[in-house]
Image (cartoon, coloured by chain):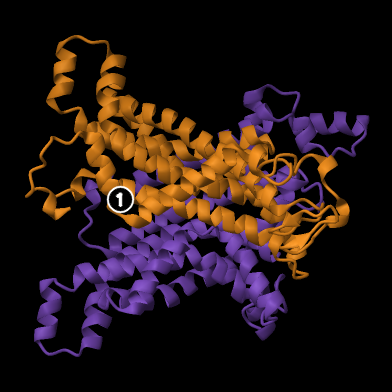
Amino acid sequence: MSGMAEIAPAAPETPLQRFVRDFTSNRLAVGALVVVLLIALAAIFAPWITPQNPYDLAQLDIMDGRLPPGASSAAGMTYWLGTDDQGRDMLSGIIYGLRISLIVGIGSALIAGVVGSTLGLVAAYAGGRVETAIMRLVDLQLSFPAILVALMILAFLGKGIGNVMIALVLVEWARYARTARGAALVERRREYIEAAECLALPRWRVLFRHLLPNCLPPLIVIGTIQIARAITLEATLSFLGLGVPITEPSLGLLIANGYQYMLSGQYWISFYPGLALLLTIMAINLVGDQLRDVLNPRQQR
Amino acid sequence: MTAWLLRRLVQAAFVVLAMTVILFIGLHVIGNPIDILISPEADQADRARAIAALGLDQPLWRQYALFLWGMLHGDLGRSFVFHEPALQLIGERLPATLELAVSAVLLAIVIGIPLGLYAGLYPNSLLGRSAMAGSILGFSLPTFWVGLMLIMLFAVRLGWLPSTGRGQTALLFGIRWSFLTRDGLAHLAMPAFNLALGNIALVLRLVRSGVRETLPLDYVRFARAKGLRPARVVGVHVMKNIMIPVVTVLGLEFGGTIAFSVVTESIFAWPGMGKLIIDSINVLDRPVIVAYLMIIVLMFVAINLVVDLLYTFLDPRVRLEDRG
């Protein structure tokens, strides 16, 4: 990074090129990004790449229940990661589970991001009572741990993918709001906002076309970390039996299903879904860390 | 000081009041209170009597007043499952949870501070580097899965520690505790460690960055120049300054540790109030759910207040006037 200023580039670099070069300066982060992309692709194309459809009962054979990793079925199929108590191929189950985990995690992080960022921007731009009210709510929300708030919401709403997402959004929005407000407070004193206001542009236009794009970098960083947090929280809630229903099992529920068999030494039913979860979360976190290093202007010298 | 304390107390009271409104809405508007508060086994006459007794035929604002009134008298309804007052039921489970949470915080101190000191003093050493790498794992590992893996390794494979339960307990002040017996301690070890994981990572990082920041300061150099033993410089002069953030963060995290014990207790079948709430949610034992949530909110508000106060006493640089 330090040699950058001394050597004048032959052609002027676009911001995107600069971003790509900064990001790829860390090999670990690039590796993590590749893992994230592979996981996302596997989840998207699950029906085409899994050895079996784990939720098509016609393809399951209960006689194949709880086979260890590497065992073969009577039909000649190899279960690389073993099978669960229903005779379901764990590898297929995990890839389908990733789908649910990613949908819930990314979906809730996006919705919370839109809601929280909007509230944060409005708070910073409006100031006064609106700001006080919103930020008090944020402080209140953040003083309670996420798991407790989610527990409270699910205790009343009951389980289900929609309800889990509602709970995650309500848990997560406050962090976006705080970040967005922090960034917007700095940006709104800049000249371009003054200029936009002098042009008598409508308020929403100043807010979303001028203020928002310049507040995006910290929000993207928070968003990446929040996706990992949402996936972990969803898995934890599903493990407790409060999250997704049995018909749409996420990684957390797969781990919970294997719990009872673990005590008799059949580790693989819990172990491999957990490993997939761990890999996903760590890869996303590493990408997020690198994004923070690249996008945080304070660390650029 | 008094004005600040008063303002803080009023704020806390508002938070608690807001929670009662949220719980009330959760109970009475989202769910059907008749299904929630009256046992499904009740017959028609019982239902009518219960509706009148609970005041469900009254307007909403009166119902809310009744709800508050009952809460002020410590009456949060009776559990459908245990047929005991919900508050009493939770009170019985509270010591087990406190024991677990306190053990976890102690473990975080005993493991986190020495490792953090070492990593701060020798940042390029192998142990220092691996402690830092380990702390990243401590943050991003899904805790419940680590708990399962602990059971698999230490209980199933090696057979060193018992997998679940509280083990043998002994009486102290009329309450049963696990830490007083060998068997109880063996049962406590894994859940406490599992619950402590996040806190260990947190304390380690706090102490490490504290040491890195404090070492080059003038007063530390002066202490060294005076010819004090390195152990005294680090143990007294450096530690004193590091302990402020550590105490504050651990204090704030104590509430989170109690909340997260919900997960740990479910994994290790630890009979505390966290396991009780999960069981209650699964069988829709709503009076217990409401009582638990109310208690934990009170606990949180109290902890936040105490930590705020402690902070101002521990660090004279904090100006009370500046704090909102």
Query: Seen in the image, is A158 located left or right of residue A14?
Result: right
Tell me which chain appears orange.
A
Circle 1: residue type: Thr
Q: Residue furthest front?
A: A76
Residue A186 location in percent, x, y? 20, 34
Are there few (<14), some (14-19), or many (20+) residues within 10 Å of tag 1?
A: few
Query: Seen in the image, is A209 located left or right of residue A117?
Result: left
Q: Quadrant of residue A243?
A: top right
For residue B298, say whether it is visible: yes
Residue B65 location in percent, x, y? 62, 32
The residue lying at 56 percent from left, 57 percent from top is B260
The residue lying at 71 percent from left, 75 percent from top is B156
Q: Which residue is mark 1?
A: B2
The residue lying at 7 percent from left, 43 percent from top is A8
Q: Colour of chain B?
A: purple
Q: Chain of mark 1?
A: B
How many numbered marks, from 0 up? 1
* Position of the C terminus of chain B by quadrant: top left
- Viewer-side residue, A82 vs B142: A82
